[in-house]
Image (cartoon, rainbow, N blue to C red):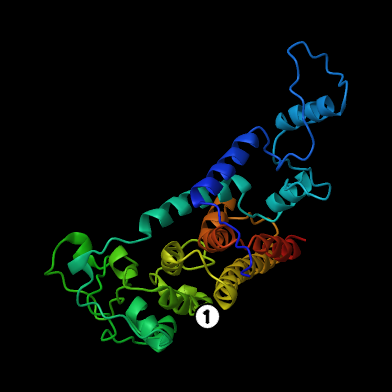
Amino acid sequence: MHPTKKRRRAPEARREDLDDDEEEGDASVLGFQALPVADLPLGFDGIPMDGAQYLAVVRQEASGRPKVVQVRNPYAIADVQTPVASSLQSQVGMPSQEWRDTFQTRLKNMRESLNPVVSLGSASEGLVVPKRHDEASWYRFLHGRTLKDEEESSNGRKSGTEGVAEGAVDRDSPASQLGRPDVQLEEHAEPALREPTPALLSRLKTSDILALLEFFPSWFSQSSMASSPSPPTIRHAVDPFHARWVFALLAKLDGRLVGDEISTLRVLARAGIERVVQERYRRAVKKTLRKQQQPQASDDIDGGEVMMSEMGAWMIVCAVSSIWGQHDLWDDARADLAKIAS
């Protein structure tokens, strides 16, 4: 005898059964109903009379509660600047929090306008940038002459003019200022400095920018050589030309950096802080010696002028700390400057 075969139900019948189950469970959003749940009457006083009404009350209260709640973290620390830190910050002569916030907002807006940079076509055609890790070529490309020529010029020796970068414009030359190309320049005219432009920045990749930023900490020590030979009233912590280049590179640099890339920016910012410390220490020593020689002499250095001379360095620190989250750099700067203030 053949075993009795079970008749399979048609797919349509099984689908109808599932549809019926879904209709029965529409009233429940907490899963399949295992126990009977009553329908509460209109005049229900809130006191269940049996288990079915109790489950209905529980379901009614659960439906009125939020599905996701957040518990207060008892270990959270409020990020509030204490008056003591603010007072110490003003004592050591650091930029105010208001200045930092304004700078950060404007820098972020500038980065959004530069990334991605619109190709300027012919503006950058024919411009050949140096190789990525060739520091000597990059120095000549930016400054218009080699570092050796820079040192000879600072020592008062003759500096050749053959190191002028091709395509650079000397905006400070008498001919450019007077609009008279027939004006004869002096024999030892200063070479032109190549300013950062959107066309030039568009040629640089993230790896190129990071490689170039690695050179600036050592170039900061040459700050007295980069700009015009006529000395300003007070020496800048970071030469304005270097500060403009670093600011432009940081404005173009990708905000998603990791590991060694962040380390490059921290070294750069610390170099700027070190330049501020060195200049303040130099001025403090000079002031002490002047007081010893001339006790009645007044301090001829204005505080606002000092802060302006340090703005290039503080812009670098603020950019690195705000865009890439390296906020502890301000603590390092505060500690270093407090040593001089004391």
Up-down relation of residue 171 to residue 259 (above or below): above
Q: What residue is drawn where x is 78% and y is 27%? A: 56
Q: Which of the two residues, 202 or 14, is positioned nearer the viewer here?
A: 14
Residue under label 1: 218
Label 1 packing within 10 angstroms: few (<14), some (14-19), many (20+): few
Q: What residue is drawn where x is 34% and y is 68%? A: 201
Q: Residue furthest top?
A: 43
Up-down relation of residue 66 to residue 104 (above or below): above
Asked if residue 165 lies left or right of residue 60, the reply is: left
The quarter holding residue 202 reads bottom left
The quarter holding residue 66 reads top right
Q: What residue is drawn where x is 47% and y is 68%? A: 239
Q: Which of the two residues, 37 or 295, is positioned nearer the viewer here?
A: 37
Tell me how many marks there are. 1
**Image quadrant in which the N terminus is located:** bottom right
Residue 106 placement (x, y as % from top left): 46, 49
Residue 273 placement (x, y as % from top left): 61, 67
Up-down relation of residue 136 to residue 185 (above or below): below
Q: Residue furthest front?
A: 1
Residue 177 placement (x, y as % from top left): 22, 61
The quarter holding residue 164 reads bottom left
Q: Residue furthest left?
A: 182
Residue 33 placement (x, y as % from top left): 73, 39
